[in-house]
Amino acid sequence: MKFGKRLKQQIEETLPSWRDKFLSYKELKKLVRLISSAESPMYGKEDAEAEFVYLLNNEIDKFNGFFMEQEEDFIIRHKELQQRIERVISTWGTNGTKPSEAEYRDEMARVRKDMVNFHGEMVLLVNYSNINYTGLAKILKKYDKRTGGLLRLPFIQKVLQQPFFITDLVSKLVKECENTIDEMFPVQVEEEIVKEQREAITVAGKGIFRNTVAALLSMQEIRRGSSTYGHFSLPPLDLSDSDLIHSFQLNPPIPTV
Amino acid sequence: MEARPALSFQRSGASQLSNHGVSGGLSSSLPALSTHLEETYQKFPNTQQAHAERELMTRPLTHATCLPANNGVVGHIFSSLSGFSSDIHYSSALPSEKHSINSPFISQSTTNTAALPLSQSSNSLLPQSTIPSHCNKENSGSWCTDPDFLDFPVSTTVLSSQIENSSCSGSMRSEDFGKQNDWQEWADQLITGEDASASNWNELLVDNVTNLEPKMAYQVEKPCIAVLAQNQQLPSPSVESHSVVNPSSSANNAPAKARMRWTPELHEAFVEAVNQLGGSERATPKGVLKLMKVEGLTIYHVKSHLQKYRTARYRPEPSEGSLEKKLTSMEEISSLDLKAGMGITEALRIQMEVQKRLHEQLETQRNLQLQIEEQGRYLQMMFEKQKSGLDKLKGSYSDPENPPVPSDATNEDATNEAPTKSEVESSQRDHGNSGTGTVNAKSVLERSPQEICGQHKAPETGDLEKPETRVSESSSQQTSKRPRIEE
């Protein structure tokens, strides 16, 4: 139930339009329980498995569709952001058509904010892919365990080929985004200030940021140490400054609907 | 149920349709189809489930093909459904249906069985496509009682594509985007809210009756969506049979269904084509499609992409924008605090750090997961190999004249790079393991199938396997040796 709870938390924290795109882990778990406990002759094992597979396929299609949709959006927005930067430079930059330092600074600040949020959204999509995959792996494991079936291994192989799991492109865009941000907005880190301002971060209620924090912490929890550690379990997650990240996890002053 | 009134409409509509001179040999097929449509309508609602609960509890379907039953992306096409005959040109029949009272709805409903493209990319929904095989199956008439319905998404896709078709036909093209935006949001509402009520449905039906074509398309979608949102049943496969061939689309239906995975390179080509045509506002999907000259790209893909592109240009970073609107008041407060504390720069920096960290961990996790599965595959293969070896062992035990030498056989697999029968025989004779001459002869026989197995497996597994094989073989050899000694 740990994963289920974590997944639920993430879904609650996620961007509103994403809420129904996640794996229906709880329902699938119920189904597995149903199948394993009530093996009635009326509903043979093959039928139960067929239905289970059918539902899983539905979920996979849901993931694929949503993922590719978002991916397409990201491709477009990525290009647009780059063009926007060029436009700002060519308009308000020192060699631009209407050089203005103030405008340049303001526009660049906006671009920076948008880029950081864009980066966050992409990372959240990768997280989406990952958490759904993890959920599928878990539910398949449960199924095999409860019903003595051999569904997991071949099915998971199929899942690995699915578009939603192949996140290479989005990861590439994420890295490109990081590079652009590092180039355009080099940051001078001042350690003392960082520590002082930690508390101030708490007021940041940006959906994406909170999302990211939640996702990261969830991942840490999920991989804390499995009770059923086996060949297919992931090692515990090592986050060196998890305290810092924990401090980000705060309730917004105004509850978001 | 609410859908019932629609059914009666359909029948009359069908005949009306035929009266209106539907192209091709449609008139004869329409009545048959419309009856199926009735059933399909009943099934409809289930498709676009925003929440999985309902979906999960529906009857099992044998068909594994599914459309994503998500909020809007219905682009997923069923490759399993071979192209429906494009002879059915509903769209051409549509204008003439305007004049009949019930037909607009009915024709729409009959044709618009596709899923609702609820997202922005509704344009990409590919019309036609699908159906054929299912339609035929369903036509047998037994399917209403047959629990094996196609996945909803299929029908919903068809529906949406059809809706799109109707709206796209002829002069309506220009109104496309505006309308689709509208009904998308609206469809979104219905689906996610699951608010569609019976009264809505009926109301919409009534509305449809008097609507002119432009509104017709719009309205038609509503009832369909309402039905979708309302009912929990699976859409009948026959729904797909009503995919309409969009007159503006290319002749090829099958690729039209497939969901397109865009890449930056493809997008570059797209942008170039758009710029050549004078910008995103002036470019038309057809023109862009022609310029891009990409195999397998359909006008629907281009259409939906173009819409996304336009939205991105004129509302840069909308998601953050909408999020911002929600949090504006809080943000003002927070930004003040931040500025007092560290400034927006620092906040962004930290946000970036967290995001980067998450991404790193995700990549690591993904690689681990891949490795785990690979390992699992390997273990499975090893297990199977062992198992077949043990089976041989058991099989040999039943025959007293055939002392088992499976371990030897499998060991040979590992040691011989390219074992041949003759090689095996000779090595077996020389091999000291078996002990007796008879054993040698028998083991050769035993080995050959084993060799074949090993040969098949060896190329798959690669070098890693060999040492492992030897290790496991030797252990099994040990165990098999013991019984032999005892004998």
Image (spheres, coloured by chain):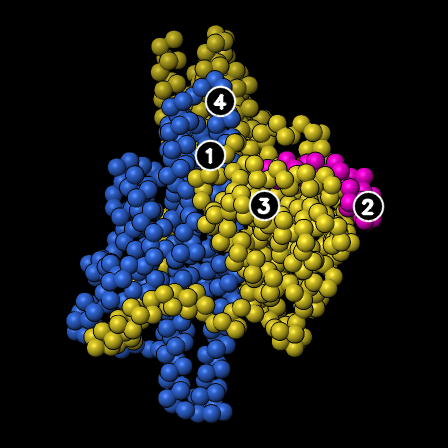
Chain colours: A blue, B yellow
Left or right, B344 with respect to A178, comes to left
Q: Chain of mark 2?
A: B
The residue pinned by badge 1 equals B57
Residue toward you, B197 or B57: B197
Query: The magenta stretch spans which residues?
Result: B15-42
Kind of residue at badge 4: Tyr
Kind of residue at badge 2: Asn
Label whose residue precedes the other's in the sequence (3 or 1): 1
Query: Residue B202, which numbered label?
Result: 3
Whether pointer 3 and pointer 2 mark residues with C-beta atoms closer than 8 Å, the reply is no
**Residue B5, x across and y down, in percent:** 63, 40
The residue pinned by badge 2 equals B19
Question: What residue is drawn where x is 61% and y is 27%?
Answer: B145
**Residue A21, x across and y down, in percent:** 44, 49
Quadrant (top left/top right/bottom left/bottom right) for the N terminus of chain B: top right
Question: What residue is drawn where x is 43% and y is 21%?
Answer: A39
